[in-house]
Structure formats: structure tokens, C-alpha cells
Amino acid sequence: MSELLSLVTVLLVGIVLGTLFFGGLWWTVRRAVSSRWVALWFITSLVVRMGTVLVGFYLACGSNWQRWLAAILGFSLARLTVTRLTQSSAPTISM
């Protein structure tokens, strides 16, 4: 039971990290398009987001491959969720 609770906790950590990563990417894109320093926005955002995710994964998972798998699953679930929530509601044109 303790191992299952540990995996669920790491899954939730993966979801939080994924939400921060992809939510931060969405926020960066929206801010950078109207900025004079577009490249600086994207480079800084990438370094901060990647650093946060890598440190978070390392602290949550260590060397346990089952924890890494659960964290990456949570990260992927967050990607799907953030992608759906941030999609444009522009009408599609079909031909």
C-alpha cells in the first residue's frame, strides 16, 4: 500500500510539473508575441521551465524507474489537459 501511495503522489507531482511547464509555455507565447525581445522571452522561459521540471523529477523520483514512469505519465496527462484548455475557439473551415 505504501508503494501505491508513493506512485500516486509522484503521479500528482508529474501533473503539477506538467501543468507548470505547458502552462508556462502558453503564457510565454502569449507574452512574447507582443514583446521587443521575443528570443529572450523564449530562451529564459525554456531554461526556467526545463530546470524546474528536471529538478522536480529528480527530487520526486530519484533512481526508481516506477516513479519515473508515474511522473512522466502525469506530465503527459497535464500536457493533454493544458492543450485542450488553451486551444483557440476559432471556427475551423472545412473544404
Image: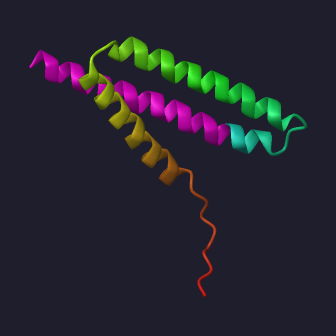
* The furthest residue to the right: 36
**Left or right: 80 in relation to 51:** left
Q: What are the residue bounds of the magenta stretch?
A: 1-27
Seen at 91% across and 37% down, the residue is: 36
Q: Measuring from the top left, give residue 53's x and y in whole percent.
A: 50, 23
Q: Measuring from the top left, give residue 43's x and y in whole percent.
A: 74, 29
Q: Quadrant of residue 31?
A: top right
Question: Looking at the figure, which quarter contains the N terminus?
Answer: top left
> How many circles with numbers are drawn on the protein?
0
Seen at 47% across and 33% down, the residue is: 18
Q: Measuring from the top left, give residue 16's x and y in whole percent.
A: 43, 29
Question: Looking at the figure, which quarter contains the C terminus?
Answer: bottom right
Seen at 59% across and 26% down, the residue is: 49
Residue 53 in magenta stretch: no
- Residue 47 vertical position relative to residue 35 in the rendered view, above or below: above
Q: Quadrant of residue 12?
A: top left
Q: Which SS type dominates the magenta stretch?
A: helix
Q: Measuring from the top left, give residue 74's x and y in whole percent.
A: 35, 35
Residue 13 in magenta stretch: yes
**Left or right: 6 in relation to 14:** left
* The furthest residue to the bottom: 95
